[in-house]
């Protein structure tokens, strides 16, 4: 596939994670839920990140590059600390079957939907209040730079 089609790439990230056999139950959202808050935790929400570059020069027509943010959230009331759940999901290079990073790293083409991607940033986990103000969740994120030949 040539070109950057955000809808297709978001779904490819969710599909890759869904078929990776992650050991922990995980809700996957290619877009932020309409309600503003996910209804299931822990979860992954895919969104845009800053810095799209549609005209990097390389090859015949160049390479388009688009960053996407893969946010991981865990409720503080998940049975163990939300921060501990987030640590488990954000582990990298361990081969653990709970690692979102390792699940994505196992298929750098996201099911042949992109040429490749690199992780360009890992956002520090932080505790955030829920919109209803009654509880909190922990969130962290990986920012992926998706690279694709231009058509």
Image (tube, helix red, strand yellow):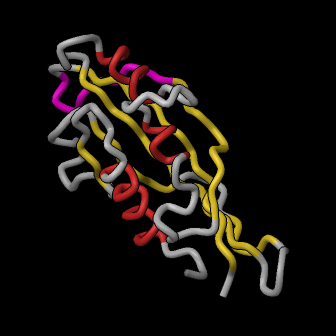
Left or right of 105? Residue 11 is: left
Residue 132 to residue 33: above or below? above
Left or right of residue 117: residue 76: left
The residue positioned 32% from the left and 53% from the top of the image is 19
Q: How many marks on residues? A: 0
> At x 84% / y 74%, what residue is drawn?
57
Residue 29, image x and y in percent? 29, 52
Location of the C terminus by quadrant is: bottom right
Task: Point out the stretch of residues depicted in magenta.
Answer: 125-133
Q: Quadrant of residue 108?
A: bottom right
Task: Choose top left, top right, bottom left or bottom right for residue 84.
Answer: top left
Residue 113 in the image: above or below residue 104: below
Check if residue 95 falls in the magenta segment. no
Image quarter hosting the N terminus: bottom right
**7 and 149: which one is in front?**
149
Question: Image point 55% across, 31% down: which residue?
Answer: 123
The answer to which image quadrant residue 140 occupies is top left
Q: Residue at x 31, y 43 (%)?
A: 21
Residue 117: x, y in percent? 63, 56
8 sits left or right of 93 in the view: left
């Amino acid at each position: 596939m040539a070109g950057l089609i955000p809808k297709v790439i978001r779904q490819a990230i969710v599909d890759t994670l869904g078929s990776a056999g992650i050991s922990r139950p995980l809700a996957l959202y290619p877009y932020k839920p309409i309600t503003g808050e996910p209804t299931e935790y822990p979860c992954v929400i895919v969104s845009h990140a800053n810095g799209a570059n549609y005209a990097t020069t390389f090859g015949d027509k160049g390479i388009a590059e688009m960053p996407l943010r893969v946010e991981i959230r865990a409720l503080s009331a998940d049975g163990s600390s939300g921060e501990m759940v987030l640590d488990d999901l954000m582990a990298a290079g361990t081969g653990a079957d709970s690692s979102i990073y390792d699940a994505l790293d196992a298929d750098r083409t996201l099911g042949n939907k992109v040429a490749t991607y690199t992780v360009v940033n890992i956002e520090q986990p932080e505790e955030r209040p829920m919109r209803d103000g009654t509880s909190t969740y922990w969130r962290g994120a990986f920012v992926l730079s998706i690279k694709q030949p231009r058509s």
